[in-house]
Amino acid sequence: MKKLLLLMMGVAFVGTAAMAQLEQKDYKKEKAEWENKIKEELKLSADQLVKYDALTKEYDDKFSAIAQDANLSKDAQKEKKMSLKKEKEAKLFEFLTPEQQTRYKELIEKKKKEMEKPANG
């Protein structure tokens, strides 16, 4: 009986770890798809691509630091991340044309609406 219980616990543990990895891969895939969509839809120039990639790397590191800060509550993390998003967008708009800025805002709105839809809706 103990062996069966240990086996079941082991399977549950491995299953949980596997699901966590899948979620992480899905997140990374979605993030990469979003970044590619931004680059394509905004028709970024070579110079803008370099700046966009550098900005994304800089802020990815900042977002990771917030996520790993055990001293912050979930609400505090969310607040800091929202602040970083606004900061990142302001820096992004420094090198986007007015047309690209408008298109970027449209893409963000579309993404927000898609995320608000119920999963089965």
Image: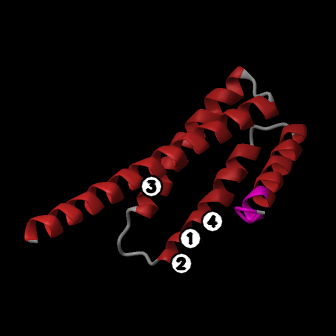
Q: Are marks 3 and 2 in contact (CB under 8 Å)?
A: no
Report the magenta residues as a range: 114-120
Magenta segment includes 44: no
Read off the residue under disc 4.
82
Amino acid found under the numbered disc labelled 1: Lys
Disc 1 + disc 4, Cβ < 8 Å: yes
Q: CA distance from mark 1 to mark 4?
A: 6 Å
Give the CA separation, mark 1 to mark 2: 5 Å
Residues at discs 4 and 3 in contact (Cβ within 8 Å): no
Q: Are marks 1 and 2 in contact (CB under 8 Å)?
A: yes
Q: Earlier in the sequence, mark 4 or mark 3?
A: 3
With 88 as the anchor, is 111 left or right in this view?
right
Query: Type of residue at label 3?
Result: Ser
Mark 3 or mark 1: whose residue is earlier in sequence: 3
Above or below: residue 116 compared with residue 56: below
Q: Residue at x 84, y 38 (%)?
A: 100
Task: Check disc 2 and give the amino acid type.
Answer: Asp
Crowding around mark 1 (Cα neighbors within 10 Å: few <14, some 14 to 19, many 20+) is: some
Rendered image quadrant of residue 7:
bottom left
| Image position of 33 (left or right of 22) | right
Q: Which residue is mark 2?
A: 75
Residue at disc 2, secondary structure: helix
Residue on which disc 3 sits: 64
Q: Is residue 119 magenta?
A: yes
State the SS at label 4: helix
The residue that label 1 is drawn on is 78
Question: Cα distance, mark 4 to mark 3?
Answer: 13 Å
Mark 3 vs mark 2, CA separation in Å:
16 Å
* Residue 1 at x, y percent in the picture: 10, 71
In x, y percent, where is residue 74?
49, 75
10 Å neighbourhood of mark 4: few (<14), some, or many (≥20)?
few
